Image (cartoon, grey):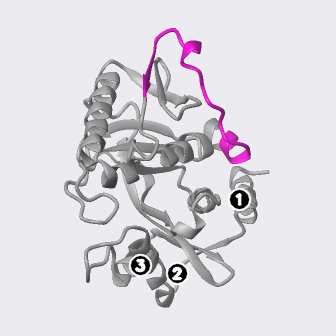
Amino acid sequence: MSVVDDAWRAAARAEEAAGISIRTLDDPNDQGIAVRIFDEVWPPESGATHVKSNLLRALVHSGGYVAAAFDDSQPVGAALAVVGRHRVSGHESEGGSPEDASSWHAHLHSHMAGVVDAYRNRHVGTAIKLHQRAWALSCGIDTVVWSFDPLVRRNARLNVQKLGTHVRDYMPNFYGNMDDAINAGDPSDRVFAWWVLDGASAISAARAPIADVDSADFDDARVIAIPDDIVSLRTTDPDQALEWRMRVREQFLDALEHDFSVVGLDPHGSYVLAKGSDS
């Protein structure tokens, strides 16, 4: 069985387990579905919207990915991704220039993926990402990249354990000030998930979630704790939420500067970082 066939089978299993179906929104008349989902998941300021249907039309027409998850006919989640590029190993130093096409590699940048509240904790997000993986592989794209808030534990577990991504980079206040109801008032620090779609971690995670790790199993490890629920904490105690943000920022930046990389999550949902490994 090819990697692509195996990916579609894994995606179908995930849809069945979540009790939903997923399809790409190629018809312009359907693309407003994704707009409505995004605005429900991340409520914008009154009268605003995160994306316009005409932008989604352009993304799809230019090779991007726009899809929605449905419970029967009810939309419950959506995702959008654009085709991007990154420097490949060996071309990231001198000698690799934008004019040298061989120094660049195409990837899919997954900008938004969300599930409405009533369908949280039903593995809909996992199903959407596995559909995105199969779609990308079918298009000849072997890497998907996206940013996520390192303080949101459910996202860390999804990305590291259920999908098998590599966590790279730490970008302080990556998006600048955000005004949606979930992120407003908090610096938009992000780490980046690099998902090598045909890699061992992604293939293994598509079959069963990757297990917790124990920092004691590594000769030199660092553990970065995160709060139980940063989204609620921003509302109930914004000062403490900011303290968590600054603490985790400092710890991540220092660890990455000293060549540590994320190797997994421990049973508490904390990041475990070690040297000489890029999980």
Q: Quadrant of residue 32?
A: bottom left
Mark 2 or 3: in front is 3
Distance Cα–Cα, label 2 vs label 3: 14 Å
Q: Which residue is mark 3?
A: 35
- First in sequence, mark 2 or 3: give its number: 2
Which region of the structure is painted magenta?
203-224
Q: Amino acid at mark 1?
A: Ala
Q: Can residue 279 be seen? A: no
| Percent of width and height locating residue 17 | 74, 61
Q: 152 and 10: which one is in front?
A: 152
Rounded to the nearest angstrom, the CA distance separating label 3 from label 1 is: 24 Å
Q: Tell which circle, 2 or 1, labels the residue nearer the N-terminal end.
A: 1
Residue 198 at what x, y percent from top left?
62, 44
Question: Which mark is nearer the camera, 2 or 1?
Answer: 1
Pick the residue in front: 120 or 219.
120
Q: How many marks?
A: 3
Depth check, front residue: 161 or 242: 242
Write down the quadrant of residue 137 in the picture: bottom right
Look at the picture and state if 57 lies above or below 128: below
Extreme residue toward the left, this view = 177
Residue furthest right as drawn: 1
The amino acid type, in three-letter code, at marker 3 is Val
Residue 14: assigned label: 1
| Label 1: element kind | helix
Residue occupying the point 44% across, 50% down: 145
Residue at 61 percent across and 82 percent down: it is: 74
**Dot 2: element:** loop
Q: Which mark is residue 26?
A: 2
